[in-house]
Image (cartoon, helix red, strand yellow):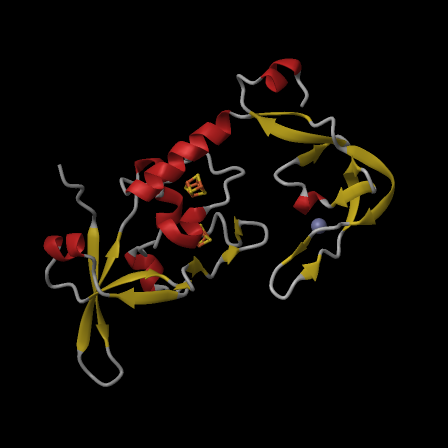
Amino acid sequence: MKTQYQVRIADINLVGGGTVKVATIEQSGRKVPGCEGCSAPCCQDFLRPFLTLDEFLSKKFHFALLPPPDWLREQAPQIQYVAVLEFKDGCCRYFDRISHKCTIFPDCPKACLAYDCREDPRPRVKEFVRERMEEMKMVWVKDTCWVKLDEPKRCRSISGSPKIHCPNMANFGFPRSNGIWAYCEEHMYGRRVRDGIVEIKVHPDSPAAKRGYA
Ligand code: SF4
Ligand code: SF4
Ligand SMILES: [Zn+2]
């Protein structure tokens, strides 16, 4: 069975005269697909949120007009454009690439609130969801290799092009033959700090999970 979307069409006057038919799509309510802690590829790639008629006409969001996708053209052949949230370089302009969070949540378009990656049939999204489900089962345990430093030290992470030395101070590190290698909380290779303890995610069936530390 094909999904039918509630399409609403606006006749938009062009500056030079004439009108174009722009499609908008109404949305169902918010779904909660377990987004906490997700790096949100939806906002950077998977999703191109359609605007509702109200969102489009109110000019509340930066938008773009795109040619309609085939499935929409089949449903409403008279449509010339579809109103979508504007993405720049494949990423939503309201997305903060450092915190990996939406800067306008929960006042984002209804399509963002209604999106559930678990229902997205595209193979690459299915693959992402499968990996994320596995990751969500993982548990945090203490990482006994990492120690608290007596005094904060400069984080030793170097990245980017040109290469930049991380400016943050680090409170934790792990011993190496030439001393302790210190990294700030952004550069602990997926670890986190809770109550002054460095934790790492492990598989729930692993010996480390059973022991409670790695
Ligand atoms: S909808 Fe899916 S991909 Fe997007 S943030 Fe939530 S869990 Fe991550
Ligand atoms: S508005 Fe927010 S939730 Fe919607 S795509 Fe952009 S960053 Fe993601
Ligand atoms: Zn750092």
12 left or right of 185? Answer: left
Residue 163 occupies quadrant: bottom right
**Considering depth in this image, is 38 or 205 the residue closer to the camera?**
205
Q: Position of residue 43 (x, y in %)?
A: 43, 51
Q: Residue at x 39, y 48 (%)?
A: 112
179 left or right of 194? Answer: right
Q: Position of residue 94 (x, y in %)?
A: 48, 58
- On the question of residue 128 being in view, the answer is yes
Q: Residue at x 35, y 35 (%)?
A: 118
Residue projecting furthest to the bottom = 16
Quarter of the image with the C terminus in it: top right
Q: Position of residue 70 (x, y in %)?
A: 16, 56
- On the question of residue 109 being in view, the answer is no
193 left or right of 105? Answer: right
Q: Is residue 59 above or below residue 177?
A: below
Residue 117 occupies quadrant: top left
Q: Is residue 44 above or below residue 12?
A: above
134 left or right of 164? Answer: left
**Considering depth in this image, is 70 or 170 the residue closer to the camera?**
170
Q: Residue at x 27, y 50 (%)?
A: 26
Residue projecting furthest to the front = 177
**View quadrant of ligand 1:** top left
Residue projecting furthest to the right = 150
Quarter of the image with the N terminus in it: top left
**Considering depth in this image, is 188 or 113 the residue closer to the camera?**
188
